[in-house]
Amino acid sequence: MKFELTILGCGGAIPTLERKPTAQYLNIQDRHFLIDCGEGTQIQLRKYNCKFSKIDHIFISHLHGDHFLGLFGYLSTLSLLGRTNCIYIYAPKDLKKLLLSHHEIIGKKLNFDIEFIELNFTESELIFEDSVVEITSFPVFHSVPCCGFIFKEKPSKRRIIKEKIEELGLSIEAIKKLKNRENFEIDGSHINYEDVTTAGQRSRSYAYCADTSFNNKIIPYVENSDLLYHEATFLETQLDKAVKTRHSTATQAATIALNAHVKQLLIGHFSARYKKADEFIKEAKKVFKNTVACYDGYIHEIKK
Protein backbone atom coordinates (compact mmCIF):
# COMPACT_ATOMS: atom_id res chain seq x y z
CA MET A 1 0.00 0.00 0.00
CA LYS A 2 1.76 3.07 -1.30
CA PHE A 3 2.52 6.22 0.70
CA GLU A 4 4.80 8.10 -1.66
CA LEU A 5 5.82 11.74 -1.97
CA THR A 6 7.23 13.28 -5.16
CA ILE A 7 8.86 16.70 -5.04
CA LEU A 8 7.81 18.65 -8.14
CA GLY A 9 9.51 21.89 -7.15
CA CYS A 10 11.80 22.79 -4.24
CA GLY A 11 12.81 26.35 -5.07
CA GLY A 12 12.05 29.60 -3.28
CA ALA A 13 10.21 32.62 -4.64
CA ILE A 14 12.49 32.94 -7.69
CA PRO A 15 12.64 29.80 -9.86
CA THR A 16 15.92 28.61 -11.36
CA LEU A 17 16.79 26.11 -14.07
CA GLU A 18 17.44 23.49 -11.38
CA ARG A 19 14.60 24.31 -8.99
CA LYS A 20 10.98 24.99 -9.90
CA PRO A 21 8.59 26.74 -7.46
CA THR A 22 6.98 24.77 -4.66
CA ALA A 23 4.74 21.84 -5.54
CA GLN A 24 4.45 18.29 -4.22
CA TYR A 25 2.50 15.22 -5.28
CA LEU A 26 1.41 12.71 -2.65
CA ASN A 27 -0.01 9.25 -3.35
CA ILE A 28 -1.60 7.53 -0.35
CA GLN A 29 -3.09 4.17 -1.27
CA ASP A 30 -4.20 5.46 -4.68
CA ARG A 31 -5.53 8.74 -3.27
CA HIS A 32 -3.75 11.48 -5.21
CA PHE A 33 -3.09 14.87 -3.64
CA LEU A 34 -1.37 18.02 -4.92
CA ILE A 35 0.27 20.19 -2.27
CA ASP A 36 0.85 23.74 -3.51
CA CYS A 37 1.02 24.46 -7.21
CA GLY A 38 3.78 26.83 -8.24
CA GLU A 39 4.36 27.95 -11.80
CA GLY A 40 5.04 25.04 -14.16
CA THR A 41 3.57 22.36 -11.91
CA GLN A 42 1.66 20.63 -14.71
CA ILE A 43 4.91 20.15 -16.65
CA GLN A 44 6.58 18.68 -13.55
CA LEU A 45 3.68 16.30 -13.01
CA ARG A 46 4.19 14.90 -16.50
CA LYS A 47 7.97 14.91 -16.24
CA TYR A 48 7.94 12.77 -13.11
CA ASN A 49 5.16 10.41 -14.25
CA CYS A 50 2.59 11.45 -11.67
CA LYS A 51 -1.10 10.59 -12.08
CA PHE A 52 -1.86 13.92 -13.75
CA SER A 53 -5.62 13.44 -14.15
CA LYS A 54 -6.31 11.50 -10.95
CA ILE A 55 -5.75 14.41 -8.57
CA ASP A 56 -9.05 15.37 -6.93
CA HIS A 57 -7.77 17.38 -3.96
CA ILE A 58 -5.43 20.40 -4.12
CA PHE A 59 -4.00 22.10 -1.03
CA ILE A 60 -2.74 25.68 -1.33
CA SER A 61 -0.87 26.82 1.78
CA HIS A 62 -0.94 30.57 1.08
CA LEU A 63 -1.31 33.18 -1.63
CA HIS A 64 2.27 33.90 -2.64
CA GLY A 65 2.72 33.35 -6.36
CA ASP A 66 5.37 30.65 -6.05
CA HIS A 67 2.76 28.46 -4.33
CA PHE A 68 -0.31 28.87 -6.56
CA LEU A 69 0.37 30.46 -9.97
CA GLY A 70 0.56 27.04 -11.62
CA LEU A 71 -3.12 26.42 -10.87
CA PHE A 72 -4.43 28.49 -13.78
CA GLY A 73 -2.65 26.42 -16.41
CA TYR A 74 -3.15 23.09 -14.69
CA LEU A 75 -6.92 23.53 -14.34
CA SER A 76 -7.19 24.77 -17.93
CA THR A 77 -5.34 21.70 -19.22
CA LEU A 78 -7.59 19.36 -17.24
CA SER A 79 -10.61 21.02 -18.84
CA LEU A 80 -9.11 20.70 -22.33
CA LEU A 81 -8.51 17.01 -21.65
CA GLY A 82 -12.23 16.58 -20.95
CA ARG A 83 -12.29 16.28 -17.18
CA THR A 84 -15.81 16.46 -15.71
CA ASN A 85 -15.24 15.34 -12.09
CA CYS A 86 -15.27 18.01 -9.40
CA ILE A 87 -11.95 19.22 -7.97
CA TYR A 88 -11.67 20.22 -4.32
CA ILE A 89 -9.33 23.11 -3.50
CA TYR A 90 -8.38 23.83 0.11
CA ALA A 91 -7.01 27.36 0.21
CA PRO A 92 -7.28 30.92 1.50
CA LYS A 93 -10.69 32.34 0.58
CA ASP A 94 -9.35 34.94 -1.87
CA LEU A 95 -8.09 32.23 -4.23
CA LYS A 96 -11.69 31.60 -5.25
CA LYS A 97 -12.02 35.23 -6.41
CA LEU A 98 -8.75 35.01 -8.34
CA LEU A 99 -9.67 31.83 -10.20
CA LEU A 100 -13.26 32.81 -10.97
CA SER A 101 -12.29 36.30 -12.19
CA HIS A 102 -9.59 34.78 -14.41
CA HIS A 103 -12.08 32.52 -16.18
CA GLU A 104 -14.61 35.36 -16.41
CA ILE A 105 -12.03 37.66 -18.05
CA ILE A 106 -10.90 35.12 -20.64
CA GLY A 107 -14.52 34.14 -21.27
CA LYS A 108 -14.04 30.43 -20.90
CA LYS A 109 -15.60 28.15 -18.30
CA LEU A 110 -14.08 24.91 -17.06
CA ASN A 111 -15.82 21.62 -17.87
CA PHE A 112 -15.87 20.68 -14.20
CA ASP A 113 -16.93 22.20 -10.91
CA ILE A 114 -14.54 23.44 -8.25
CA GLU A 115 -15.46 23.21 -4.60
CA PHE A 116 -13.48 25.64 -2.47
CA ILE A 117 -12.80 24.82 1.17
CA GLU A 118 -11.57 27.85 3.12
CA LEU A 119 -8.59 27.25 5.39
CA ASN A 120 -8.54 28.19 9.06
CA PHE A 121 -5.43 30.22 9.97
CA THR A 122 -6.01 30.39 13.71
CA GLU A 123 -6.25 26.74 14.78
CA SER A 124 -5.82 23.17 13.62
CA GLU A 125 -8.76 21.75 11.69
CA LEU A 126 -9.71 18.44 10.07
CA ILE A 127 -10.35 19.37 6.42
CA PHE A 128 -10.68 15.97 4.72
CA GLU A 129 -11.18 12.32 5.61
CA ASP A 130 -12.27 9.11 4.00
CA SER A 131 -11.91 5.45 4.93
CA VAL A 132 -8.12 5.54 4.49
CA VAL A 133 -6.71 8.97 5.31
CA GLU A 134 -7.40 12.10 7.31
CA ILE A 135 -5.91 15.51 6.50
CA THR A 136 -5.55 18.31 9.01
CA SER A 137 -4.49 21.91 8.47
CA PHE A 138 -2.58 23.92 11.05
CA PRO A 139 -1.42 27.56 11.21
CA VAL A 140 2.21 28.51 10.55
CA PHE A 141 3.92 31.87 10.87
CA HIS A 142 4.62 33.59 7.57
CA SER A 143 4.20 37.17 6.30
CA VAL A 144 0.68 36.34 5.05
CA PRO A 145 -1.88 33.86 6.43
CA CYS A 146 -0.42 30.41 5.82
CA CYS A 147 -1.19 26.79 6.71
CA GLY A 148 0.70 23.54 6.95
CA PHE A 149 -0.93 20.14 6.45
CA ILE A 150 -0.78 16.72 8.14
CA PHE A 151 -1.58 13.66 6.02
CA LYS A 152 -2.19 10.62 8.19
CA GLU A 153 -3.43 7.12 7.50
CA LYS A 154 -6.28 5.90 9.62
CA PRO A 155 -5.51 2.86 11.80
CA SER A 156 -5.76 -0.33 9.80
CA LYS A 157 -8.06 -3.16 10.84
CA ARG A 158 -6.74 -5.55 13.44
CA ARG A 159 -5.93 -9.14 12.46
CA ILE A 160 -8.06 -11.95 13.78
CA ILE A 161 -6.22 -14.83 15.46
CA LYS A 162 -7.25 -17.78 13.25
CA GLU A 163 -7.40 -20.30 16.07
CA LYS A 164 -10.01 -18.16 17.82
CA ILE A 165 -12.46 -18.42 14.91
CA GLU A 166 -13.09 -22.13 15.43
CA GLU A 167 -12.54 -22.09 19.19
CA LEU A 168 -15.22 -19.47 19.78
CA GLY A 169 -17.37 -20.17 16.73
CA LEU A 170 -17.00 -16.64 15.43
CA SER A 171 -19.43 -15.59 12.70
CA ILE A 172 -18.49 -13.32 9.79
CA GLU A 173 -20.36 -10.50 11.53
CA ALA A 174 -18.38 -11.05 14.74
CA ILE A 175 -15.06 -11.15 12.89
CA LYS A 176 -15.80 -7.87 11.12
CA LYS A 177 -16.66 -6.11 14.38
CA LEU A 178 -13.69 -7.49 16.28
CA LYS A 179 -11.27 -6.46 13.50
CA ASN A 180 -12.78 -2.97 13.73
CA ARG A 181 -11.97 -2.78 17.46
CA GLU A 182 -15.53 -3.52 18.58
CA ASN A 183 -16.25 -5.99 21.37
CA PHE A 184 -18.83 -8.72 20.75
CA GLU A 185 -21.18 -11.02 22.65
CA ILE A 186 -21.88 -14.67 21.79
CA ASP A 187 -24.52 -16.53 23.79
CA GLY A 188 -24.14 -14.10 26.67
CA SER A 189 -20.33 -14.33 26.71
CA HIS A 190 -18.44 -11.05 26.28
CA ILE A 191 -15.51 -11.17 23.83
CA ASN A 192 -12.95 -8.38 24.01
CA TYR A 193 -11.45 -7.60 20.61
CA GLU A 194 -7.95 -7.33 22.13
CA ASP A 195 -8.13 -10.98 23.24
CA VAL A 196 -8.83 -12.41 19.78
CA THR A 197 -6.97 -10.03 17.45
CA THR A 198 -3.49 -8.68 16.92
CA ALA A 199 -2.52 -5.15 15.91
CA GLY A 200 -2.77 -4.25 12.22
CA GLN A 201 -0.15 -2.36 10.27
CA ARG A 202 0.96 0.96 11.73
CA SER A 203 -0.37 4.27 10.43
CA ARG A 204 2.01 6.45 8.43
CA SER A 205 2.08 10.24 8.45
CA TYR A 206 3.52 13.17 6.50
CA ALA A 207 3.71 16.74 7.81
CA TYR A 208 4.06 19.60 5.33
CA CYS A 209 5.26 22.77 6.98
CA ALA A 210 4.94 25.51 4.40
CA ASP A 211 6.64 28.92 4.42
CA THR A 212 7.13 29.94 8.02
CA SER A 213 9.40 31.66 10.47
CA PHE A 214 10.81 29.62 13.34
CA ASN A 215 8.19 29.03 16.00
CA ASN A 216 7.97 26.27 18.62
CA LYS A 217 4.16 26.39 18.40
CA ILE A 218 4.49 24.25 15.27
CA ILE A 219 5.92 21.31 17.25
CA PRO A 220 2.68 19.83 18.67
CA TYR A 221 1.13 19.71 15.19
CA VAL A 222 3.99 17.79 13.53
CA GLU A 223 5.10 15.71 16.52
CA ASN A 224 6.10 12.08 15.82
CA SER A 225 5.52 12.34 12.07
CA ASP A 226 7.26 9.78 9.87
CA LEU A 227 8.36 12.55 7.52
CA LEU A 228 8.43 16.31 8.07
CA TYR A 229 8.93 18.76 5.24
CA HIS A 230 10.05 22.10 6.65
CA GLU A 231 11.14 25.05 4.58
CA ALA A 232 14.78 26.16 4.88
CA THR A 233 15.05 29.23 2.68
CA PHE A 234 18.30 30.48 4.22
CA LEU A 235 21.44 29.35 5.97
CA GLU A 236 22.11 30.53 9.51
CA THR A 237 24.61 33.11 8.19
CA GLN A 238 21.61 35.00 6.80
CA LEU A 239 19.39 34.69 9.84
CA ASP A 240 18.61 38.40 9.62
CA LYS A 241 17.04 37.86 6.17
CA ALA A 242 15.06 34.89 7.47
CA VAL A 243 13.66 36.99 10.30
CA LYS A 244 12.86 39.92 8.00
CA THR A 245 11.04 37.78 5.40
CA ARG A 246 9.52 35.40 7.96
CA HIS A 247 11.26 32.34 6.61
CA SER A 248 13.46 29.72 8.33
CA THR A 249 17.07 28.60 8.23
CA ALA A 250 18.29 25.02 7.92
CA THR A 251 19.27 25.06 11.60
CA GLN A 252 15.80 26.21 12.62
CA ALA A 253 14.10 23.53 10.51
CA ALA A 254 16.32 20.88 12.08
CA THR A 255 15.54 22.21 15.57
CA ILE A 256 11.80 21.78 14.96
CA ALA A 257 12.42 18.23 13.71
CA LEU A 258 14.54 17.36 16.73
CA ASN A 259 12.08 18.70 19.28
CA ALA A 260 9.08 17.18 17.50
CA HIS A 261 10.73 13.72 17.49
CA VAL A 262 10.02 13.13 13.80
CA LYS A 263 11.65 10.19 12.04
CA GLN A 264 13.03 12.10 9.06
CA LEU A 265 13.34 15.73 7.98
CA LEU A 266 13.08 16.93 4.40
CA ILE A 267 14.20 20.52 3.75
CA GLY A 268 13.49 22.69 0.71
CA HIS A 269 12.29 26.09 -0.57
CA PHE A 270 15.94 27.09 -1.02
CA SER A 271 16.65 30.69 -1.98
CA ALA A 272 17.91 31.13 -5.56
CA ARG A 273 21.10 32.73 -4.17
CA TYR A 274 22.29 29.22 -3.22
CA LYS A 275 23.36 27.09 -6.18
CA LYS A 276 23.79 23.84 -4.24
CA ALA A 277 22.12 22.34 -1.18
CA ASP A 278 25.32 20.91 0.35
CA GLU A 279 25.64 23.64 2.98
CA PHE A 280 21.99 23.23 3.97
CA ILE A 281 22.53 19.53 4.66
CA LYS A 282 25.74 20.17 6.54
CA GLU A 283 24.09 22.82 8.72
CA ALA A 284 20.90 20.85 9.43
CA LYS A 285 22.68 17.58 10.25
CA LYS A 286 24.57 19.26 13.08
CA VAL A 287 21.19 19.44 14.83
CA PHE A 288 19.18 16.57 13.29
CA LYS A 289 21.13 13.82 11.56
CA ASN A 290 18.29 12.21 9.61
CA THR A 291 17.91 15.14 7.22
CA VAL A 292 17.57 15.09 3.42
CA ALA A 293 17.70 18.10 1.10
CA CYS A 294 15.01 17.65 -1.51
CA TYR A 295 15.44 18.31 -5.23
CA ASP A 296 13.04 18.40 -8.15
CA GLY A 297 12.08 14.80 -8.87
CA TYR A 298 13.03 13.48 -5.43
CA ILE A 299 10.77 10.57 -4.38
CA HIS A 300 10.32 9.44 -0.80
CA GLU A 301 8.30 6.38 0.13
CA ILE A 302 7.18 5.97 3.73
CA LYS A 303 7.15 2.26 4.41
CA LYS A 304 4.91 0.37 6.82
Image (cartoon, helix red, strand yellow):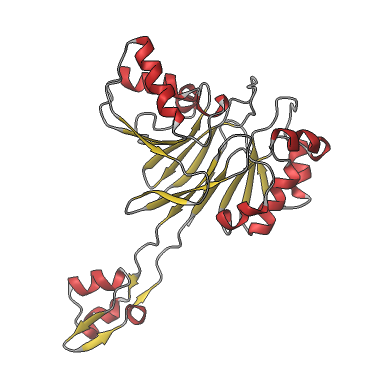
Residue lying at 66% horizontally and 44% vertically, measured from the top left? 292
Q: Residue furthest bottom?
A: 188
In this rendering, the answer to whether 159 lies above or below 262 is below
Q: Is 7 or 154 nearer to us in this picture?
A: 154
**In x, y percent, where is residue 125?**
45, 51
On the rendered structure, is 65 left or right of 99?
Answer: right
Q: Position of residue 264 (x, y in %)?
A: 62, 52
Residue 225 in view of the camera: no
136 displayed left or right of 187: right
Q: Who's the residue at 52% across and 37% down the image?
A: 61
Q: Position of residue 144 (x, y in %)?
A: 59, 34
- Residue furthest toward the top? 106
Q: Position of residue 157 (x, y in %)?
A: 34, 65
* 51 and 214: which is toward the camera: 214
Horizontally, residue 294 falls left or right of residue 234, namely left
How many numbered marks does the figure carry?
Answer: 0
Toward the viewer: 147 or 303?
147
Q: Residue furthest right?
A: 237
Q: Is residue 272 visible?
A: yes
* Residue in the picture at 28% in, 81% down: 164
Q: Quadrant of residue 269?
A: top right
